[in-house]
Image (cartoon, rainbow, N blue to C red):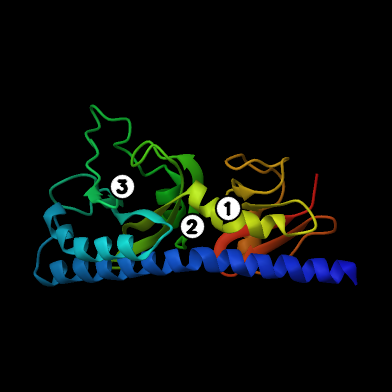
Amino acid sequence: MAGQVAEQAAGQVAEQVGRVLEAVFEAVAEIRSDTAALLARVRAEGRRPVSADLAALRPGLHRRLARQELVSGVGFIAAPGVLDDVPAWLEWWQSTASGEVRPLLPDLDPGRSAYADYTHWDWFALPRDTGRRAVAGPYVDYLCSDQYSLTLAVPVKAAGGFAGVAAADVYLRDFETAVLPLLRGLSAPAHLVNARGRVAASADPAHLAGTLTRGPDFAAVLERARPTGPDPVRLLPCAGVPLVLVVGGA
């Protein structure tokens, strides 16, 4: 009976964690829809999009920053070659501690900037390679905020091809505030990992946030979308959000 109760409690926590991030993913999905519609309108005009066209996304990006308490930055990151006037572009807006909304203006000159090629970063590569939404990090976001962050991203398609990603940043401290009480309420040590096995939040001193967890194929667990794993370790997908709740273990 105790094992059954613990299993039910873990399932409830997985669902609650999913709900915490689902609202952020809903905002990201809206950005994807807005971006895809914008790119389609430009194509209908018989031309290729340019970076100035993306200014039409800004009112929606500003609203989502104001609406989502967890979100610190939002935007669209173009795939190389999608825009006609620049090789790479981030239409990215972020909120400051005072509540001001400001644009990110990164140096994307490959001759000067180490951040010019963003295509290998998980927040871009995972949605591109899998066609699915992804949680990247936590990592120190030197490009945007210099804060320890998670990035939630989804692929954007245009003309049947990959056009880039829509994404939102969440500071790790804010995510931990939301989920650590849930993890600590379980009867066994628990932590959350993304598809790569990186720990997104933890109430288990053996698995610190930001470290990599070896062993299970967490991407496969998310693909199956059902609990798995022999006792004493249980792996529970978090209600459609690409995180796995890991309960128990050494």
Name the residue that disc number 3 marks. 96
The residue singled out by tag 1 in the image is 194
Q: Nearer the viewer, mark 3 or mark 2?
A: 3
Q: Nearer the viewer, residue 38 or 9?
A: 9
Q: Which mark is residue 134?
A: 2
Q: CA distance from mark 3 to mark 2?
A: 25 Å
Q: Which quadrant does the N terminus fall into?
A: bottom right
Q: Which mark is residue 160?
A: none
42 relative position to 110: left or right: left
- Which residue is at 52% across, 54% downward? 175
Judged from the image, the secondary structure of the residue bearing numbered disc 3 is loop
Q: Are marks 1 and 2 in contact (CB under 8 Å)?
A: yes
Q: Is residue 117 left or right of residue 140?
A: left
The first of marks 3 and 2 along the sequence is 3
Q: Residues within 10 Å of mark 3 (few under 14, many from 20)?
A: few
**Residue lying furthest top:** 112
Task: Name the residue at 78% across, 59% down.
Answer: 229
Look at label 1 and name its amino acid. Asn
Question: Looking at the image, can residue 161 be seen?
Answer: no
Lateral position of residue 90 relative to residue 148, left or right: left
